[in-house]
Amino acid sequence: MASGFGNDGGRGRCFHFWQDFQKCYASADVPQQCLSQRDDYLECLHHTKEIARVTRIKTEELKQAAAKKQATSQSKNEAKAAADSNLPKLNIIDEKQQPVESKA
């Protein structure tokens, strides 16, 4: 929370990051020295880096699932094409195997 108080009345979840940033800013000669503390505090407040990371992971997961689905579909199509080929019709491969009769 911006007030420094959390939902239950205690310290907020980002209060520690704010204290680090404030301490750095008070003792720094140049404000650019405290960029990492500022970034930590803003990340705690807004979760921008976390959201971006989750979005990238989800996008990659969907991309891999689509590629897997396409590969599965392609292999099914190849198997169907092989099953529907002309080889059985040309008597190169018998569709039904004839039982071998043995003479005793």
Image (spheres, rainbow, N blue to C red):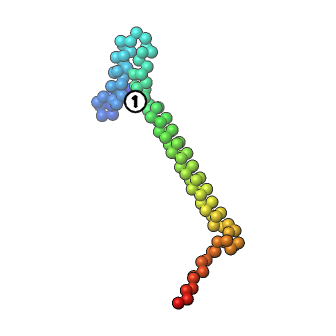
Q: How many marks?
A: 1
Task: Say what secondary structure mark 1 lies in.
Answer: helix
At 40% from the left and 9% from the top, the residue drawn is 29
- Extreme-top residue of the structure: 29
At 34% from the left and 17% from the top, the residue drawn is 23
At 65% from the left and 63% from the top, the residue drawn is 81
Q: Quadrant of residue 25?
A: top left
- Nearest to the observer: residue 57 or residue 18: 57
At 40% from the left and 25% from the top, the residue drawn is 41
With respect to residue 17, does 24 lie above or below?
Answer: above
Left or right: 19, with 76 as reference point: left
Q: Quadrant of residue 34?
A: top left
The residue to which callout 1 is attached is: 44
Residue 98's spot in the image, x, y percent? 60, 80
Residue 100's spot in the image, x, y percent? 57, 82
With respect to residue 15, does 102 lie above or below?
Answer: below
- Nearest to the observer: residue 87 or residue 12: 87
Left or right: 72, with 3 as reference point: right
Asked whether residue 98 is in view, the answer is yes
Q: Quadrant of residue 80?
A: bottom right
